[in-house]
Image (cartoon, rainbow, N blue to C red):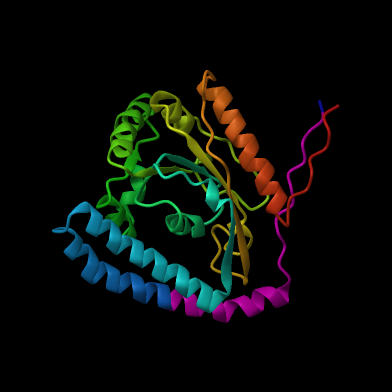
């Protein structure tokens, strides 16, 4: 069987990078100011507020950061498939390329909770805020216990009327590439009978992972119709979800290169 080629990373010209520097500096300054105010005022207040109000505070911080990103860096959004979103909260499995989608998904799915690594709760300000929103924070070093925790807390969050957001690749993957899909979200969907909403996007092309620079452009988001496991195993269901996400990610990506055909 032939080896599959990795798609090329998006290469920015020196001119593009130079132009992005002042925009990105301005963004970072403003984002730091927003976050400082949020940390100094909102987090202490949130300690005495009920969940719905705590979530509202965090939601406004996210919207403020996204607005600032649009104003300073020229990053806008175009969404397809919003009509596919059901009235009842369920599970969202989303491509993970950037920090952008961790905030932007709240445009379409809220209130929401996240399946995330426990160590993220130690990040100053933002991690502390996440801890106040009752995420499903798992220890990846203890896989069996982590899966049981996800199932128990996932059922509870769905009963509470919250969307559950899962990034099945587990970490941010460069635009145009695909990571290993973990099965937790599919297992939760099979165990609860909850539909899965798949989401594809290309945010990593304008807000690359591990990069200070951000580039003007439009993030294309594609929201798929609800997918139900039925009689499928969790592995088969995950494979079907992955196929939808990756196929649609390729369709909206500027950097994807078709793999060689297998011999």
Residue 232 screen position, x and y as percent: 54, 20
Residue that protrudes farthest toward the right in the picture: 263
| Above or below 154: residue 22 | below
In this view, the residue in front, 147 or 194, is: 194
Q: Is residue 97 magenta?
A: no
User: Residue drawn 71% across and 67% down?
Assistant: 12
In this view, the residue in front, 101 or 8, is: 101
Q: Is residue 86 left or right of residue 13?
A: left
- Whether residue 125 can be seen here: no
Residue 104 screen position, x and y as percent: 47, 59
Residue 70 screen position, x and y as percent: 52, 73
In this view, the residue in front, 175 or 79, is: 79
Residue that protrudes farthest toward the left in the picture: 48
- Whether residue 200 can be seen here: yes
Residue 95 screen position, x and y as percent: 56, 46
Q: Report the quarter where the N terminus lies.
A: top right
Residue 16 lies in what quarter of the image? bottom right
User: Residue drawn 23% across and 59% down?
Assistant: 53
Question: How many marks do you count on the picture?
Answer: 0
Residue 260 lies in what quarter of the image? top right
| Above or below 116: residue 55 | below
Q: Is residue 41 left or right of residue 225?
A: left
Q: Report the quarter where the C terminus lies.
A: top right
Q: Give the extent of the magenta segment.
A: 2-29
User: Residue drawn 72% across and 62% down?
Assistant: 11
| Above or below 95: residue 69 | below
């Amino acid at each position: 069987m032939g080896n599959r080629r990795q798609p090329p990373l998006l290469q920015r010209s020196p001119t593009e990078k130079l132009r992005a520097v002042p925009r990105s500096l301005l963004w970072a300054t403003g984002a730091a100011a927003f976050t400082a105010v949020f940390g100094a005022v909102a987090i202490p207040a949130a300690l005495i507020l009920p969940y719905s109000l705590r979530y509202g505070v965090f939601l406004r911080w996210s919207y403020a950061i996204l607005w600032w990103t649009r104003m300073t860096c020229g990053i806008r959004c175009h969404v397809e498939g919003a009509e596919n979103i059901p009235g009842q909260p369920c599970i969202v499995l989303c491509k993970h390329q950037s920090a952008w989608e961790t905030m932007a998904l709240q445009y379409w799915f809220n209130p929401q909770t996240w399946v995330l690594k426990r160590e993220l709760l130690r990040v100053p300000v933002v991690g502390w805020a996440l801890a106040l929103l009752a995420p499903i924070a798992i220890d990846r070093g203890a896989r069996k216990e982590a899966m049981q925790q996800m199932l128990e807390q996932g059922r509870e969050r769905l009963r509470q009327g919250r969307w559950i957001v899962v990034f099945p690749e587990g970490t941010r993957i460069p635009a145009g590439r695909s990571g290993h899909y973990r099965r937790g979200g599919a297992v939760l969907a099979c165990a609860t009978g909850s539909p899965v909403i798949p989401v594809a996007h290309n945010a990593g092309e304008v807000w690359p992972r591990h990069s200070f620079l951000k580039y003007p452009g439009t993030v294309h988001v594609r929201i798929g119709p609800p997918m139900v496991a039925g009689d499928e195993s969790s592995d088969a269901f995950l494979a079907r979800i992955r196929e939808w996400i990756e196929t649609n990610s390729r369709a909206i990506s500027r950097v994807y290169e078709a793999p060689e055909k297998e011999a």
